[in-house]
Amino acid sequence: MGGNVERARHWQYPELPGVDLLRARYVHKNFVRHTHEGFVIAAISEGVEIFHHGGFDQYAGPGTLALVNPDTPHTGRAGVPEGWRYGAVYPGPELVAEIAAETTGIRGAPGFTSPVLDDPYAAGLVHRVLRAADEGDPLAADTFLRAAVTRLLRRNGGPLPQRPVRSAGARTAARARAVLEERLDRPPTLHRLATDLGTTPFALLRAFRDVYGMPPHSWLTDARVRRARRLLDAGVRPADVAVAVGFSDQPHLNRHFTRIVGVPPGAYQRERKNVQEPSGGPVVPSKAWQNR
C-alpha cells in the first residue's frame, strides 16, 4: 500500500449538500474517542481498521463497511502494520431518515444495527459516490449515495433505540453537558462543576460516562472540534478559531482537530473554500485517489 505514506482528503461536493466525503490512507493514525453529528459509512479498500464501539473492538477489512450512528462514541486505528485505506461518506440524519421513509419499513429514527457489515457491493457504491463527486457528476453521485444508504438500511438497519427514562444521574449529566456547551472556552474544573450541580466529582464522572460514552473532558474536546468545524466552514481563520473554541493556541487546535477529523484544520478549510468559490474550481486529487 505504498510504504508508510499517509494521506487524506476531507471535502464536500456542492451537489450533495451537508454530506462530508473522505478518502484516506492511514498507517499510524490513532483517532481518539469522538462522535459525529451525522452517520459514518466507511468502505475499507485495503488493510484493516480497528475501532472501539459499543464496548468492544470492531474489525473492518477489505470489502466491509464500518458503520457508526450519530452521536455514538468510537475510536479508530490500524489493525495491521501496513494500515488501512478507505473511502467514506457522512450523510446527515435528515437525509438518512428521508431515504428510510421512502425505501424501507423502518419506523422511528433509522440507524444501523451492526457496526461492521461485510458487503463488497455496498462498499463499491460508496467508492462510486466519491468517484462521481471527483468527476463532477451530480446525478451519479446522488444516485449512488441513495442506493448505498438504501441497501445498508435494508440489510443492517432498524430504529435507533429510544433513550431510557432519565435517572437522577442522567439528569445531572445533561445539566453538566449544558454548562460545558455554554463554556467551551472557559470550562470549570470537575470539582467546581460537580459542586455547582450538587454532586461529587466521581459521581458526576460516572454519570456523564454512562450517558455520553466518554468523560467530560473528552466530550469537551469533541464539542470544541465540532464548533471549530462550523467556524472553519464559515471562513474564520484557524488561529481565531482556536481562541474562540477554547484551545490555548493554533497548535493545540491542529493536534486535536487532526486526531478527530483526520486532516489538519487548514487543509479542511481549503476544501470548504473550493466548494464556496466555484470560480477557483475543485481540488483535483491525483490519479492514485481517483477510481478508488
Image: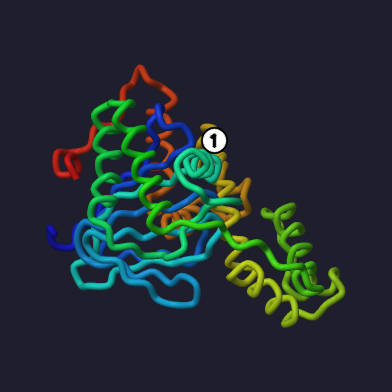
The image quadrant of residue 138 is top left
Residue sitting at x 27%, y 58% = 119
Identify the colour scheme used. rainbow
The image quadrant of residue 67 is bottom left
Q: Which one is in front, 274 or 119? A: 119
Q: Which one is in front, 72 or 231? A: 72
Asked if residue 139 is positioned above or below residue 56 in the image, the reply reads above
Q: How many marks?
A: 1
Instruction: In the displayed orientation, state which residue is furthest to the top.
Output: 279
Three-letter residue code for mark 1: Val
Where is residue 74? Give x, y as percent.
47, 66
Residue sitting at x 45%, y 41% = 103
Asked if residue 207 is positioned above or below residue 151 in the image, the reply reads below
Crowd around label 1: few <14 · some 14–19 · many ≥20 (10 Å):
some
Q: Quadrant of the N terminus?
A: bottom left
Answer with left or right where residue 43 lies relative to residue 46: right
SS category of the residue bearing label 1: loop
Where is residue 131? Give x, y as percent.
24, 37
Q: Quadrant of the C terminus?
A: top left
Q: Which one is in front, 96 or 255? A: 96
Residue 33 visible within the image = yes
Where is residue 121? Give x, y as percent.
24, 51
Residue sitting at x 74%, y 52% = 182
Asked if residue 287 is positioned above or below residue 77 in the image, the reply reads above
Answer with left or right where residue 90 lies relative to residue 229: left
Residue on which disc 1 sits: 236
Residue 252 visible within the image = no
Asked if residue 56 is positioned above or below residue 75 in the image, the reply reads below
Answer with left or right where residue 287 lies relative to residue 113: left
Where is residue 105? Give x, y as percent.
51, 48
Residue sitting at x 44%, y 25% = 276
